[in-house]
Image (cartoon, coloured by chain):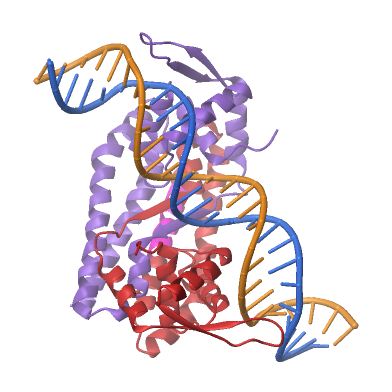
Chain colours: A red, B purple, C orange, D blue
DNA sequence: CCTAACATGTAAACTGTTACATGATTCC
DNA sequence: GGAATCATGTAACAGTTTACATGTTAGG
């Protein structure tokens, strides 16, 4: 059996955190891992089917009227598979694509005033993300912690620390450029 | 004329910073923007051709023996195109895919000792990146600053601040988990 | 009654990477 | 003479997103 693609583990993990439908998975991803891992809706349904074929999730039909609908849960093998993947310390890599940083890198072609504008835009973005993390992700992570899962909150704290650092750097740079 | 894909602007920017061949572009990207923007070699050559067709770069053949080789430089229109793109404050978005954070998010399935191991691995990664930035990117950015381009160094400082923040958070979390 | 949110699914397009092939030059 | 580095290029593949299509349920 071929190794699963990463989005499959996201699905397994979200099912373990209480998601029941593909739609739930998408909602939870958007509300929690979105800033360090996204997944598009079009990937979810085919993957759920595959996971069911491989016996890692169990789905049963719960149609609403004429509309098909499936509710899923992890099987024991699915949970084992998730644990094996989580344990693999081998891949903790990351990939960042940051247009703000890329444009700053090339910004010497611009007028100083334009660079300042750009840095301000980067700071505004960091502020927006922090606001979203605080308003939308925090309550969800706090609820999970109260249910005994502490690590979503730890991850959120890391996300906040990262964006805070970006925010502080932008503020410093703005002062230098002014 | 359709808007160019982002890697095309990376090429324009790198040509402006002194790259002459496709190979140069790849080398500069690997040595400088790699931690916030990568580009694969296979994308570069077709894009250079396209940029030449659109009059944004000028290439001339400088073969080595029987091996073809092209040296490129920015045209005025190419530089204008770069500036227009840089000015567009509309897209300063970013995309992060961080397996370390994703696994931390789901880490409640693991034993506490395993989580600690994982956080240590994340910290080790941050340390490695910081080392690379300091050893490989710093000299290059410093040389560019001495040549009058200060923003590659600013971008590097932001990268360092980000990884430093990650490192500090991991250290804190390790202490909490121990 | 209408809109928003719930919910599933597919086809096509796009983006990016991997793997391979080729050959020159420089340094040990 | 062999290895590493310089240098270009393509074909196949994998991964991801966009756009569309469809229908339900709950609330204002």
Is any atom of residue B173 visible in this view? yes
Q: Give the range drawn in magenta.
A: A161-174
Q: Foreground residue, D5 or A64?
A: A64
Residue lying at 18% horizontally and 77% vertically, measured from the top left: B113
Residue lying at 37% horizontally and 46% vertically, measured from the top left: B35
Q: Position of residue A106 (x, y in %)?
A: 48, 36
Answer above or below: position of A35 versus B61: below
- Residue B175: quarter of image: bottom left
Answer above or below: position of A19 versus A81: below
Q: Quadrant of the N terminus of chain B?
A: top right
- Residue D3: quarter of image: top left
Answer above or below: position of A178 versus B170: above
Is any atom of residue A175 visible in this view? no
Q: Foreground residue, C1 or B56?
A: C1
Q: Where is residue B77 in the image (x, y as percent from the top left)?
A: 63, 23
- Residue A2: quarter of image: bottom left
Q: Where is residue B56 in the image (x, y as percent from the top left)?
A: 60, 24
Q: Foreground residue, B56 or B167?
A: B56
Q: Please indicate whether residue A17 sits to the left or right of residue B112 in the image.
A: right
Q: Foreground residue, D27 or A87?
A: A87
Residue lying at 43% horizontally and 10% vertically, measured from the top left: B62
Q: How many labels does the image show?
A: 0
* Extreme-top residue of the structure: B65
- Judged by its main secondary structure, the magenta piece is helix
Residue lying at 61% horizontally and 37% vertically, measured from the top left: B4
Asked if residue A65 lies in the magenta stretch, the reply is no
Asked if residue A171 lies in the magenta stretch, the reply is yes
Q: In which quarter of the image is the C terminus of chain B?
A: bottom left
Q: Where is residue A22 in the image (x, y as percent from the top left)?
A: 55, 76
């Amino acid at each position: 059996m071929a190794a699963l693609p990463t989005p499959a583990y996201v699905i397994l993990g979200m099912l373990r955190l209480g998601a029941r439908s593909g739609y739930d998975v998408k909602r939870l991803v958007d509300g929690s891992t979105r800033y360090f891992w996204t997944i598009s809706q079009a990937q979810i349904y085919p993957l759920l089917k595959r996971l069911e074929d491989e016996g890692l999730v169990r789905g049963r039909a719960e149609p609403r009227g004429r509309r098909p609908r499936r509710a899923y849960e992890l099987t024991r093998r699915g949970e084992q598979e998730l644990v094996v993947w989580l344990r693999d310390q081998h891949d903790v890599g990351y990939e960042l694509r940051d247009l703000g940083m890329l444009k700053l890198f090339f910004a010497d072609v611009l007028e100083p005033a334009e660079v300042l504008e750009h840095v301000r835009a980067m700071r505004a973005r960091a502020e927006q993300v922090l606001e979203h993390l605080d308003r939308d992700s925090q309550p969800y992570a706090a609820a999970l912690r109260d249910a005994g899962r502490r690590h979503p909150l730890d991850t959120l704290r890391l996300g906040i620390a990262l964006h805070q650092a970006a925010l502080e750097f932008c503020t410093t740079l703005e002062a230098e450029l002014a």
